[in-house]
Image (tube, rainbow, N blue to C red):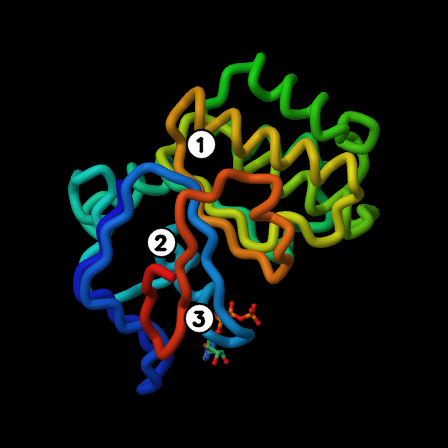
Amino acid sequence: MLQLRNLLKKYGNTVILDIPDLQLNTGIYWIKGINGAGKTTLFKVLAGLLPYQGQIFLRGETELKQALIRHRQLINYSEAEPLYPTFLTGQELVNLVAAAKKPSPAQVNELTERLQVSAFLAQPIGSYSSGMLKKLSILLAFLGKPTLIILDEPLITLDAAAITTVNQLIMEYYQKQEISFLLSSHQNFITHDLPVTATLLLENKTLSFV
Ligand SMILES: Nc1ncnc2c1ncn2[C@@H]1O[C@H](COP(=O)(O)OP(=O)(O)OP(=O)(O)O)[C@@H](O)[C@H]1O
């Protein structure tokens, strides 16, 4: 599903990621790492948001740098603490992302209903609580038919019902559509609710199976 070869990411002269070779089959992966280990940097690189050296292949297809637009359709990413334009309504943002990710109207309706966001989609995002913002960000990450969904700290600020819904959505999308997930969480309980395929540790700039 995903292959990294000689992946090198630096900020200035400081090396943050140095991953010689890593291959992930379809699955749900929990990425662990202490604060500052480089998880966000890795996710942004994979999502096509940061430049890097080396090669990233998705489904054995063209390398990410050679097909940025296609890869952005195949990798969806929800940031740990998303920042969106405050003047847009949630609905306007959903429409904007939907134009790129091309979900069916039925998928948008189902996600809206299950994540219980319809009550506030008409409000400007600047008025959202952190939990409302998180739900919107998770909804956007499920839109379309990606190969890989990256959810950075998907459970923070969510209430118990929303956590259950997110866990169910992850399992359904994986089991029914074979969509893979990279999840980052400092919370241990995720392993009790989700059949995590494997855990990877980001440490000393590299990513290894635990
Ligand atoms: N734009 C940037 N410029 C320079 N250094 C950066 C930049 N962004 C992150 N870093 C550095 O890169 C390293 C990895 O940061 P990153 O945010 O990827 O870690 P993380 O694993 O996501 O941490 P956390 O668990 O705290 O969210 C840190 O040392 C950080 O200071």
- 1 or 3: mark nearer the eye: 3
Cβ of mark 3 under 8 A from ligand 1: yes
Q: Does any portion of residue 125 appear in the rendered image?
A: no
User: Any mark on residue 142, and which?
Assistant: none
Spatial CA span between label 2 and label 1:
18 Å
Quadrant for residue 20, please give it.
bottom left
Relative to 196, 1 lies left or right: left
Q: Residue at x 27, y 40 (%)?
A: 1
10 Å crowding of disc 2: few (<14), some (14-19), many (20+): many
- Of callouts 1 and 3, which one flags the residue occurring earlier in the amino acid sequence? 3
Evaluate if marks 1 and 3 touch, with contact meaning CB atoms under 8 Å apart.
no
* Residue 125: percent from left, percent from top: 75, 45
Spatial CA span between label 3 and label 2:
12 Å
- 3 or 2: mark nearer the eye: 3
Q: Which residue is mark 3?
A: 38
Position of residue 73 relative to residue 153, above or below, is above
* Relative depth, front residue between 59 and 11: 59
* Residue 166: percent from left, percent from top: 63, 36
